[in-house]
Image: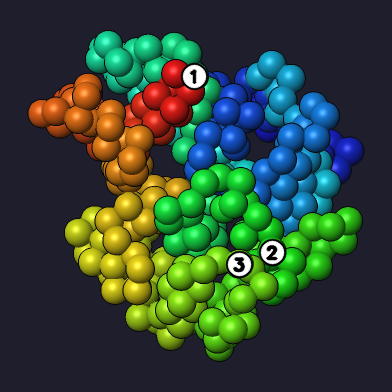
Amino acid sequence: MDIKFKNRKIIFNDADALDVGLSLDCGQAFRWEKKGDCWHGVAFGKAVDILQNGKEITISGNVSEDDITTWVEYFDLNRDYTSICQRLCVDDYLNRAITEFGGIRILKQESWEALCSFIISQNNNIPRIKGIIGRLCATFGEDLGNGDYSFPGAEALANCTVEDLAPLRSGFRAKYIIDAAQKVTDGTVDLEKLKTCPMNEAREELIQIKGVGAKVAECTLLYGCGRVDAFPVDVWVRRIMGELYPEGLPECTKNVEGIAQQFLFHWRRNQ
């Protein structure tokens, strides 16, 4: 893959096995919107537009040459998805999912944003999730101009009350957001450590947070910590497992269960 910074834009050429639209809009991130041919959103405190033309991907807006590594990591471009997909395709169902929706990559989002977003996602649909997150950012995030706001850090929410969060219309999730913010701020939950510590230890640390169960913990580890062996199970994945894999995932998914899950989730949801 060739990477360059030109005319204040980051350009990836020959980005393999990446469909930007599928990756941004397959249920793993909630701050992206299609505007014309571009995807517009805020990540890492910066508003950007992302345009894909074949295997060329252009990221423009608030970017600098120093941001290249950040976006390589965000789209997981150092991982060989071509080889992973070839391995997964020995399974008939995964082969169908990857054939139909090839190009999905796991987005490595900021850990706190992923944790907070998936707390909000509980018993919720995607339009409502996006609405709550949008109001959260507009109320507590930094104003970036043009209607864009950064995702507020944990410290910005740690001293809030449930009443302070009432304008978000997040319901029962408000108390969970506050507890998560407090535990991250005071170090009870060390998000950086979760990226490398043993998985069982990482899971145990996350479920200390009120309202965080197995699904939110796995989502945080997969989408916020880059742990592609994490395996979130929601209603769709539970149905997939019951109908297609009653004896468990096939051997070909070992250590990349989260990648397999994303293909299966998006495929089944769009059947």
Please give the residue where the numbered disc 1 appears in the rendered image. Answer: 101
Residue 257, percent from left and from top: 29, 36
Q: Are marks 2 and 3 in contact (CB under 8 Å)?
A: yes
At x 14%, y 28%, the residue is: 246
Please give the residue where the numbered disc 3 appears in the rendered image. Answer: 169
Mark 1 / mark 3, whichever is N-terminal: 1
Q: CA distance from mark 2 to mark 3?
A: 9 Å
Left or right? Give the position of 207 relative to 14.
left
Q: Is residue 136 shown above or below 224?
A: below
Mark 1 / mark 2, whichever is N-terminal: 1
Q: Secondary structure at mark 1?
A: helix
Please give the residue where the numbered disc 2 appears in the rendered image. Answer: 135
Q: Are marks 1 and 3 in contact (CB under 8 Å)?
A: no
Q: Nearer the viewer, residue 150 or 216?
A: 216
**What is the crowding at mark 2: few (fewer than 14 residues within 10 Å), some, or many (at least 20)?**
some
Q: Secondary structure at mark 3?
A: loop
Q: Quadrant of the C terminus?
A: top left
